[in-house]
Amino acid sequence: MRVLLSFCLAFWLVLMMFPDSWARVQGPCVDCHTMHNSQNGSAVVTNGPFRALTRGDCVGCHTGTNTGSNNIPYILSDTEPTYGDVGISGNTLAGGNFYWVADSGGNDDTKGHNVVYLAAQDANIGYTPPGWDNANFTANGAVAGGEASWSKQLTCAGKYGCHGTHTDEDDFRSISGAHHADDSTIDGSTVGKSFRFLYGIIGIEDSDWEYQPTATAHNQYYAIDRADGMNDNPANADPKSINYLCAECHGKFHSGVGDTEGADDEGSTVGSPWIRHPSDFDMNNVKTKEYGAYPGPFGTGNAYWPGAPVGANDLTAGVRSQVLQADGDAIVLCISCHRAHGSPNADLLRWDYNQCQASSGNAGNCGCYACHTSKY
Ligand code: HEC
Ligand code: HEC
Ligand code: HEC
Ligand code: HEC
Ligand code: HEC
């Protein structure tokens, strides 16, 4: 027993000495790269060669079925992934999955972000994101170069994308070096040191990208409380928060809390009654109301419920397994309700909104009840 313990301790010490070796890519160069894309005169990978001499484009490498032990996050599956009620019990990851929106899969424009390599232009929306605010939320670089309406389709990374920097249209250039970067410190200073290569954003990364997350094993998202003197002015939003990421393309949905929508009164009031669902708002402010009983029918003792995640304004306290314990630990996020990549539900929602019935007494798969605990 003692031998085993000291072996474990030694192993742990080695890991502590090289903590970054967990998150950087590992293994033979040949697994991921081909120098000329030619072997015996034939192509090594069809459709190649690819940028950075890789054996696939972003989607190609990231297509597969998650098992919980794969060391690459799969964001698209060839066959329909298992999702469960709210996407925490199947084989999808934190971002959900593009399967349902992809032309190769469900081919339903409403169920995911129509990223250029996977799906044609969204037939309902077109190229420009709903709620696009081209003048604000540009601290991490202006997406789409700030053009008033988008001339190009959404990409994984780059000028028209979510990951990487937004200066360059080429998505490989915008994340160059990130896969090999030491990301033991996530401070948003480079793409590799940003939460999930989302340039400028911070957070604590779950080691298996939230494969079947629990109250203790999950991403810890960073957000701020707009009641902390942040009010509703976009200039006061925190560029490092996960909500800011969404606001880079959907800014009006982050800020519209004034009496009516419009430049003049946006920023005037913050609080109930709201005109758009709040995000960057801490439930500790309203814990005497129904919110104090989070996660309602989905848990007890204010356990963190990864089905409707909440963010925190202080990452030094680590991954929270219980919330509503201290100010700033239960902040509403865009992704409290949405999945970033896609889901089996309309509007990339985590659960089926149409199943949400007031006073039904049946939690079913309606995550709204996690916070609106008295509407259940
Ligand atoms: C050659 C295969 C390959 C290609 C091409 C590739 N990736 Fe990856 N990617 C990986 C592997 C392996 C990992 C897991 C290791 C890691 O986290 O760095 C990963 C991880 C990631 C992560 C998660 C990082 C984290 O913090 O956990 C993101 C985001 C990502 N890739 C985005 C992209 C984007 C965007 C592109 C295209 C510009 C791309 N990848 C191209 C293999 C690839
Ligand atoms: C598990 C997959 C994986 C393995 C193994 C891997 N790479 Fe990469 N590498 C990538 C991906 C993906 C990119 C492109 C995206 C990026 O730059 O983040 C990349 C980019 C690069 C780049 C350009 C960016 C930079 O960091 O300068 C170089 C050079 C590179 N790899 C060299 C190597 C060498 C040499 C090896 C073997 C010792 C190796 N890679 C092994 C996935 C891998
Ligand atoms: C780089 C820009 C960009 C970012 C960042 C971004 N989106 Fe989007 N989003 C778009 C575009 C473009 C569309 C419209 C086309 C489409 O559906 O893909 C869209 C559409 C949507 C839709 C409607 C989908 C539909 O078909 O009805 C939702 C919901 C959404 N985004 C939520 C989010 C959330 C939540 C985040 C943050 C995790 C986010 N977006 C981040 C660009 C972005
Ligand atoms: C992560 C927690 C959370 C989730 C999930 C959530 N809400 Fe909310 N919601 C809040 C908070 C906090 C407020 C603001 C309450 C306040 O200011 O008193 C709010 C406000 C609202 C309001 C406006 C109330 C007012 O006083 O103006 C409505 C309506 C609403 N939510 C509906 C929904 C619906 C429908 C869903 C599911 C699609 C949902 N919410 C999911 C936390 C949440
Ligand atoms: C309380 C749950 C909830 C939160 C939090 C939330 N959304 Fe939504 N979102 C929805 C629902 C439900 C819809 C469906 C349309 C509607 O009800 O207005 C939607 C629709 C959307 C759409 C599609 C609009 C269209 O025209 O098709 C976008 C884009 C979007 N949300 C982005 C965001 C962003 C960005 C944030 C954070 C700033 C956010 N959402 C926060 C529940 C939420």
Image (cartoon, helix red, strand yellow):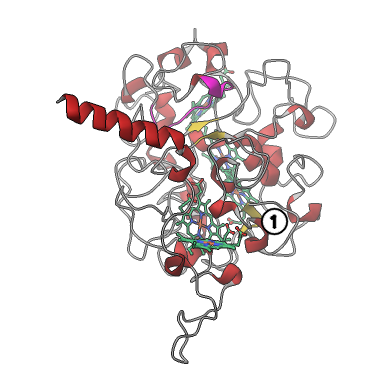
Question: Horizontal and vertical percent for residue 347?
Answer: 51, 48
**Could you tell me if residue 71 is visible in this image?**
yes
Residue 312: within the magenta?
A: yes
Relative placement, left or right, of 76 versus 335 is: left
Is 310 situated above or below 283?
Answer: below
Secondary structure found at label 1? loop
Local crowd size for mark 1, using a 10 Å CA cut-off: few (<14), some (14–19), many (≥20)? some
Q: In the image, 286: left or right of 142?
A: left
| Mark 1 CB within 8 Å of ligand 3 | yes
Q: Is residue 94 magenta?
A: no
Closer-to-camera residue (352/237): 237
Q: Residue at x 32, y 32 (%)?
A: 10
Pick the residue in front: 241 or 5: 5
Stretch of the chain drawn in magenta: 305-316
Q: Is residue 293 left or right of residue 239?
A: left
Majority secondary structure in the magenta region: loop
Say what amino acid the circle numbered 1 marks.
Thr
Tell me the quadrant of ligand 5. Answer: top right
Kindly identify the residue that appears in the image at 56 percent across and 17 percent down.
328
Quarter of the view holding residue 171: bottom right
Q: Mark 1 = which residue?
A: 128
- The image shows residue 98 at horizontal and vertical percentages of 46, 57
